[in-house]
Amino acid sequence: MPNANMLDLVHRYYGAYQSKDRQAIEQLLTDDFTFTSPYDDHIDRQLYFERCWPNSETSRAYTIEKLFEQGNEALVRYKAELNTGKVFRNTELLRFNGNKIAEVDVYFGRTLKEASEK
C-alpha cells in the first residue's frame, strides 16, 4: 500500500511550485537537501534556492501524470506548463528522510506542444 504521507508530500512539493510558495518548499526540505539535474551536480539547499527556485516564476501549472513510491523514494513524471504556453515533461526521483524531502534527481524530458495545442 502506498505511503499516503509521502505521496501527500510529493503533491505539496509541486503544488508549492505552482503557487510560488517558497515558505512551503522550505518546510518540505531537509537541512541537508541536495538537488541534481543535467545542469546541477548535487547542489545544496542554498544553491537550489538561488538557481532553481526562481524558475517557479516562469511556470503556470504542474500536472502529475505518474507517481510511484517504494521504500523512502518516489518517482514522479509530471507535465509543466510555462507562462509562455510552452509545455514540457520531466521525471524526478525524490528521496525522503522522515517527513521531508532529502534529495531530488531530475531527468529532463522534451518540450511538448504549446498549451493551447494540447
Image (spheres, rainbow, N blue to C red):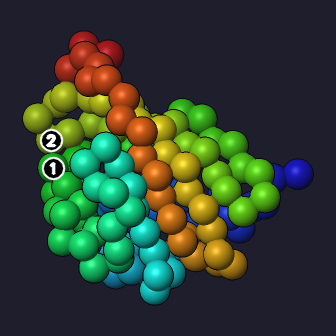
Q: Which of the two labelled residues, at mark 2 and mark 1, occupies the earlier sequence position?
A: 1
Q: Give the distance between the C-alpha atoms of the residues marked 2 and 1, in whole angstroms.
A: 6 Å
Q: Is mark 1 on a helix, strand or loop?
A: helix
In this picture, residue 48 sits left or right of residue 51: right
In this picture, residue 14 sits left or right of residue 8: left
Going by the numbered disc 1, the residue's amino acid type is Thr
Note whether residue 111 is visible. Answer: yes
The circle on residue 58 is 1
Residue drawn at x 36%, y 29% is 109
Instruction: Classify mark 1: residues with Cα within 10 Å, few (<14), some (14-19) or many (20+).
Output: some
Q: Position of residue 13 (x, y in %)?
A: 46, 62
Identify which residue, 114 or 77, lies in the foreground. Answer: 77
Residue drawn at x 60%, y 35% is 66
The answer to whether marks 2 and 1 mark residues whose Cβ atoms lie closer than 8 Å is: yes
Identify which residue, 90 or 27, lies in the foreground. Answer: 90
Going by the numbered disc 2, the residue's amino acid type is Asn
Corner quadrant of residue 27: bottom left
Check the image and name the residue furthest to the right.
Answer: 1
Check the image and name the residue furthest to the left.
Answer: 84
Residue drawn at x 33%, y 57% is 41
The circle on residue 83 is 2
